[in-house]
Amino acid sequence: VLAGRRALVTGSTSGIGLAVARALAQAGAKVMLNGSRVAADAESTRAALAAETGVEIGYTPANLADPASARGLVEATIAAFGGVDILINNAGIQHVAAVDAFPDDTWDQLLAINLSSVFHTTKAALPGMKAQGWGRIVNIASAHGLVASPFKAPYTASKHAVVGFSKAVALEVAEQGITCNALCPGYVRTPLVEKQVVDQAKVHNLPEERVIREVILAAQPTKQFVEAEEVAAYAVFLCSDAAKSVTGSAPLIDGGWTAR
Ligand code: NAD
């Protein structure tokens, strides 16, 4: 369904981003991978995905906390593929702490990566999408884009902002063949969540399996993690022509979390 499309997925060397990159490639799109560092295994990830899917896969390191690097990542993708049809803003970080104990520099870093990078990549990608009259922007927000949890105020603020940003962009480009949506997953077992399991186990003095069931998955009625592949499949749908009228939305993949 995406044959010939050119995609950029930020933060795609692990977790949800890698699953989305794989699903886009399996659907026929060329994919530019991105991570914050020249990771030793980035080239093997790139080569494995290319071999597995038979499409062109690139890799561009860029620290999205830096606006010029975020813009540069879009420019590098345009240089490699001739344009960007699909932009998946996935890179994100979490830091769990009470507001009055939250480090100032971590607040700045979190907003730079989770929110400002979405502005910078979108700004850089839109002129090409407008010129060709086709584009898909999928921002990986979170259930925390719609509801809140204690000790996650900066993350919750950043994800609510991403949902609002996505709606405004969707309205601006609605007549130009471009859609913009914010996907809102519940808990997905990725390195980002593994770190929370370890941290919460220490805080609550509980074994990790009990932390998963009684702390992390307490919010999720299914009592199961969402699979990264479920998020990826939804992203592929949003990028397809079948989803051309789905714009300005914030679809939930949250195991019933926000139904309460
Ligand atoms: P992850 O830690 O596995 O992946 C995060 C990715 O972002 C990595 O590829 C990392 O390299 C990249 N990244 C981090 N800082 C970066 C920077 N400065 N520059 C460039 N890339 C950077 O985490 P994940 O769980 O896969 O998270 C992906 C997205 O999904 C995030 O936006 C996260 O907020 C969101 N999300 C995750 C969950 C969950 O339960 N895991 C739920 C809802 C939303």
Image (spheres, rainbow, N blue to C red):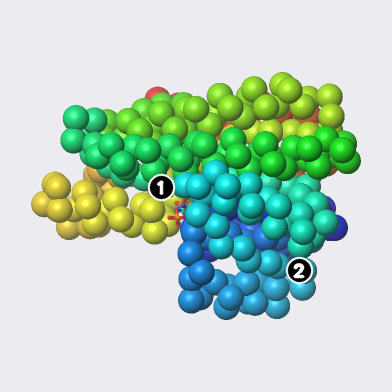
Relative image position of residue 173 (x, y in whole percent): 77, 27
Query: At 74% across and 33% down in the image, what residue appears?
Result: 179
Mark 2–mark 1 CB contact (< 8 Å): no
Depth check: give the residue in front, 11 or 250: 11
Q: Where is 169 relative to 26, above or below?
A: above
On screen, residue 222 versus residue 16, left or right, reads left
Check residue 93 in the rendering and tell me which mark sits there, or answer none. Answer: 1
On screen, residue 9 versus residue 2, left or right, reads left
Instruction: Indicate the amino acid at tag 1.
Output: Ile
- Residue tagged by mark 2? 56
For label 1, the crowd category at 10 Å Cα-Cα, with few meaning under 14, some 14 to 19 and many 20 or more, is: some
Secondary structure at numbered mark 1: loop
Check residue 251 in the rendering and tell me which mark sits there, or answer none. Answer: none
State yes or no: Cβ of the residue under disc 1 lies below 8 Å from any atom of ligand 1: yes
> Among all residues in the image, which is located at the extreme front?
68
Query: At 72% across and 57% down in the image, what residue appears?
Result: 77
Relative image position of residue 130 (x, y in whole percent): 83, 35
Q: Which quadrant would residue 208 be assigned to in this image? A: bottom left
Relative image position of residue 201 (x, y in whole percent): 18, 53
Query: At 36% across and 28% down in the image, what residue appears?
Result: 148
**Is any part of residue 236 visible from this angle?**
no
Query: At 27% across and 53% down in the image, what residue appears?
Result: 197
Instruction: Indicate the amino acid at tag 2.
Output: Glu
> Among all residues in the image, which is located at the extreme right?
132
Q: Earlier in the sequence, mark 2 or mark 1?
A: 2
Secondary structure at numbered mark 2: loop
Image quarter (top left, top right, bottom left or bottom right) of the C terminus: top left
**Is any part of residue 48 visible from this angle?**
yes
On screen, residue 207 versus residue 84, left or right, reads left
For label 2, the crowd category at 10 Å Cα-Cα, with few meaning under 14, some 14 to 19 and many 20 or more, is: some
State yes or no: Cβ of the residue under disc 2 lies below 8 Å from any atom of ligand 1: no
Question: Gap between marks 2 and 1, in whole Å?
Answer: 28 Å
